[in-house]
Image (spheres, rainbow, N blue to C red):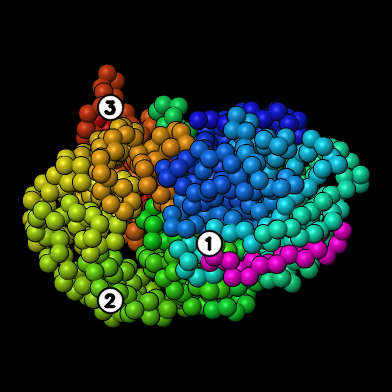
Amino acid sequence: MMRKSFGIAFVALSLLLNWPLRAQQISVLDKVNLYMGTANDYGQMTPGATVPYSQIQVCPDSKPRQHPGYDYEVPAISGFSINRLSGVGGSGCGGNVSLMPDATGEGVQLLKQTEQASPGYYSVQLSNGVGFAATADDQMAVERFSFPDPSKAVLLLNPRSAFDKVFAAYFHQKTPSMGQGYAECANTCGRGRYHLHYRLYASAPFVLDTIADGRLRLTFDLSSQPSTLGPQDIEVRIVVSTGFADELERLEERDVWGRTFEAILKRAQIRWQHFLSSVEVEGGTEDQQIIFYTSLYRTFHSPFRVTDNTLTRNRYLGTDGKVHEAKDFQYYSSWSLWDTYRTKFPLITLLDGIHSSDIMQSLAQLYITGKKDWSTDHECVPTVRTEHAIATLLDAYRQGISIPSLRDAYPGMVAEVKRLSLKSPDQCLEASGDFWALGQLAGELGMTNEAARWSKRGEEIFDSIWPQAFQHIDETFTKMRGNGLYQGTRWQYRWGAPMYLNRMIDLVGKKELAGQLQTFFRDELYNQGNEPDIHVPFLFGRLGMPQLTNGIVRSLATESVTHRYGGNDAYPTPFVGCAFVNRPRGYCPEMDEDDGAMSAWYVFASIGMYPLVVGEAIYELFPPLFDKVTLHLGTDRQTTVVITKAGGKGKSTNGPCKRVTWNGKRLRNFQLSVKELKKGGELFFHY
């Protein structure tokens, strides 16, 4: 399902073709299908207008809605809201400041054939004749409405719109064309709260009155429209703060209206082009390239940058409820680390050297301002969970990312591991990995005794649970729900601590463990629909069988396979199909995209490398999906890595890869450190 044409002149895509972008740049943006994974419960993503690392994502909210607000298969809408998280499951969070261009707000539907979405842009025609288009900036939603009858230009504002519970909300008109509001809402799964301060600026004056169900009606006089807008158009710009109402008081008209809709859209596209051009792929099918670039696009949705040099003097609201200053860095928030630490953040630290230091510094700051496993009551943006941040920081540090406050964060890390729950086997496995990461990090910081202490504790926890709960396979290992584990079977969780693979080998034997791993995939016990075992296809290299990884990964990424498990339980009837497809039902049933976790998995699977143990900063290597992959790394994007698969003249690349070379030197273990990779060169797969 690709983008669709939209007939309203001011948002016609032909406008973009006049911009000075190279043909290659246009084509890369064209390879992003924002509708992939947006239908029903097949990904829980949205096609909203956004820019990288922005809390703004303007999108219609379906009625009834899916977790992220939008469902491709539901044309009825409740309005257009400005924020949401992508594919996080649960109840979702965001959905604030909903606007409906209709006098009653009832029975309004999207005319699906007019819907159009591309990076930084969304537009649609509504059943009531109104045209809608949106773009975004870091802290501003830009929405344009075109009314068929200017005398009936009305917007219904719902100050209490949200995907979860609303604790407080208000909106007050301050000038004839501007109002200010606030919303305090529950985060995903009702855990914690975020605080949203915003201002709504309109291109024309409006009269505000209250109607039934708490919504506000904005009735516009279009006789005083700016010359840049048509006589039927209203443009609304919603500026959000980073947790402070007084921040909005410093806004001036030129800050809000200084650029046209088209100029903001152009800047959004250029920014997306910068991120998407960090990887170039050659070969593969058209669908594979579209799935790849769509996945790369979704990797950079979050975390959100929530400081702004102009407006906030780098202030941010800490998780302790206090105001802090981000000295010499930009503060980021919005985390879903339980899923994204496995794939998304290692990919960001690989591809985005410009922002990675600030992102990791922000994550380290959580340990200083009161980090909890879930969202706190003092979040400035929608967020979810922050488990396994130690491994994330360790991995970034070993990649060479600067994290100035890492040592200051260390006491908070110690406090965190001391309160880890050890009530279930899966919790024990995850905790053993957290202790391992803390021990490794202490070693990096020169704390020899601390490193030995925490490493020993991790080994003790692993040794206390793996032989007892996971070593001896029986008929209960295939059961998912009601087995005492969180969203996984014992088969899937038994591989959940890859940093202790050598201890598994000592207990089972290398040959026997390798055979069990092959059985795991042969008997279709792997679950691509959830995260606990998504690293398992990449274990073969460490068991002496690196050639097996390629076929399994290629099958999971591109072919129809049998899926016995969904997000929470075994399917009543196994789902047979591709896990990643270029259409609205883009993933397996119940397969959450999880804020970029699955997208980043696909990117890694496509380029021929994977971070098996997050914290080692070492990649397992296997032939890429594409014939050639070029990575542009470093802050100046001058470091280039070329990944090529070739069998030589007359040889096929369908068989097993016999060896891998890095800059001409053979890699006998099919592994490469990220630091070495970032030096640049050629990774060559020989058949």
Magenta stretch prevailing secondary structure: strand
For marks 3 and 1, give the CA distance: 50 Å
Closer-to-camera residue (74/378): 74
Magenta part of the chain: 164-186
Closer mark to the observer between disc 2 and disc 1: 1
Q: Amino acid at mark 1?
A: Asp
Closer-to-camera residue (485/446): 485
Q: Is residue 629 visible?
A: no
Closer-to-camera residue (371/65): 65
Image location (x, y in percent) of residue 277 = 54, 40
Label ID, residue 653: 3
Circles 2 and 3: CB atoms closer than 8 Å: no
Q: Is residue 130 visible?
A: yes
**Residue under the image location 78 percent in, 39 percent down:** 147
Label ID, residue 454: 2
- Left or right: 387 as drawn, with respect to 480: right
**Residue under the image location 88 percent in, 48 percent down:** 221
Residue 56, located in which quarter of the rendered image? bottom right
**Residue under the image location 22 percent in, 67 percent down:** 425
Q: Amino acid at mark 3?
A: Thr
Q: Earlier in the sequence, mark 2 or mark 1?
A: 1
For marks 2 and 3, give the CA distance: 45 Å
Q: Earlier in the sequence, mark 2 or mark 3?
A: 2
Q: How many residues crowd mark 2 within 10 Å: few (<14), some (14–19), many (20+)?
A: many
Q: Is residue 267 above or below residue 92?
A: above
Residue with the mark numbered 1: 164
Circles 2 and 1: CB atoms closer than 8 Å: no
